[in-house]
Amino acid sequence: MKKIGFIGLGNMGLPMSKNLLAANFIVYGLDLNKKAEEALQEFGGLTGVSISEMTGVCDVIITSLPSSDAVEEIFLGEEGLIKHSQPGMILMDTSTVAPEMNLKVEKAVRNKGIEYLAAPVSGGVIGAVNRTLTFMVGGSEETYQKALPIMNVLGEKIFHVNEKIDSGTATKLINNLLIGFYTAGVSEALNLAKQSNIDLENLYEILNVSYAKSRIFERNYKSFIANDDYEPGFSLKLLRKDLGFALDLAEKHHLDLPISKNLFDMYEEAEESGLGEKDMSVVFQKLSEQSTSK
Ligand code: NAD
């Protein structure tokens, strides 16, 4: 039976690891947060291992980490994955990071016989729990085919974007740029409705059969705004991080994205006001509070 290592047992990583266990893989989990490791242990996962111990027993290591810095430390650090991995092993990073980080890791695995995929995911925590994630994968076709059975356990729609290692990440950043737009748009529109004394549930029913219908509208309204509860979910700080990466990518191509820059500033301000850990849809609450205090 395949042994899989999973590093980063957060909102996404923990349910993904549990799904691997449910599919009869042996899973070794590692997280800085011991509570997350305990949660995996309760489900049958093995924890308390170092990276070198993990690479000593696993054929595949999956990561789901919150930042480029964390990915750099786990992959390229002194006691990191690349130092300890054996030829033939597959390292698959599902985190959303800067494309440059994918290139840096690819350079480090080159000529070592270690296989690497940059495979960010979309679909949120619900997708991670229900195995309905979409994978956007960059890397060699051969490695993609080898990792496909594992991705099929974790997700529903698996796309090999192309062989360029950062192609999946660029696709994911474009996805999240649009999510940032839709979330801001839904928040402003619903706030306008609220201030105009239009019942939001009624509005939802109407818009859901009109052209304004969207998955983000449905998600943000039904799962968060309607309950006035903004956790857990896709944290505002993670969205702001991805918008920053998208703007960096645009700059690399000498593209100016003025509306996206405004969007980034809005999320950055919301993060600085202490909302970073809440679901991104919390911008509705912020706008709504600002309107009522005027
Ligand atoms: P999270 O913050 O909930 O989880 C990250 C986990 O990594 C935490 O448990 C943290 O303790 C652990 N961690 C951080 N540094 C570590 C290190 N050096 N060693 C070991 N563990 C470490 O984040 P998340 O929401 O699960 O997101 C993970 C990744 O998936 C991010 O890159 C995010 O952009 C991406 N993503 C998230 C969502 C979502 O809806 N949450 C959706 C798609 C993609």
Image: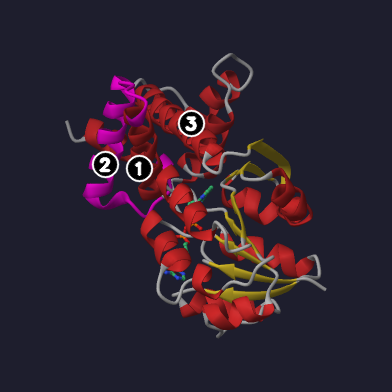
* Relative to 138, 236 lies left or right: left
Ligand 1 within 8 Å of the CB at mark 3: no
Instruction: Find the distance from the CA under tag 2 to the CA under tag 1.
Output: 6 Å
Provide the residue designation for mark 3: 174
Q: Foreground mark, 3 or 1?
A: 3
Q: Foreground mark, 2 or 3?
A: 3
Q: Which residue is drawn at 69% across and 65% down?
A: 88
Asked if the stretch drawn in magenta spans residue 162, the answer is: no
- Kindly indicate the quadrant of the structure image that contains residue 58: bottom right
The answer to which of marks 2 and 1 sits earlier in the sequence is 1
Main SS of the magenta segment?
A: helix
Viewer-proximal residue among 12 and 103:
103
Q: Which mark is residue 136?
A: none
Residue 114 % position (x, y): 62, 62
Instruction: Find the distance from the CA under tag 2 to the CA under tag 3.
Output: 18 Å
Residue 21 % position (x, y): 74, 70
Residue type at numbered disc 2: Glu
Provide the residue designation for mark 2: 268
Which span of residues is magenta-colored? 252-281
Q: In which quarter of the image is the C terminus?
A: top left
Q: Residue at x 33, y 35 (%)?
A: 248
Q: In which quarter of the image is the N terminus?
A: bottom right
Q: Residue at x 48, y 80 (%)?
A: 34
* Relative to 96, 292 lies left or right: left
Q: Which residue is drawn at 40% across and 70% down?
A: 77
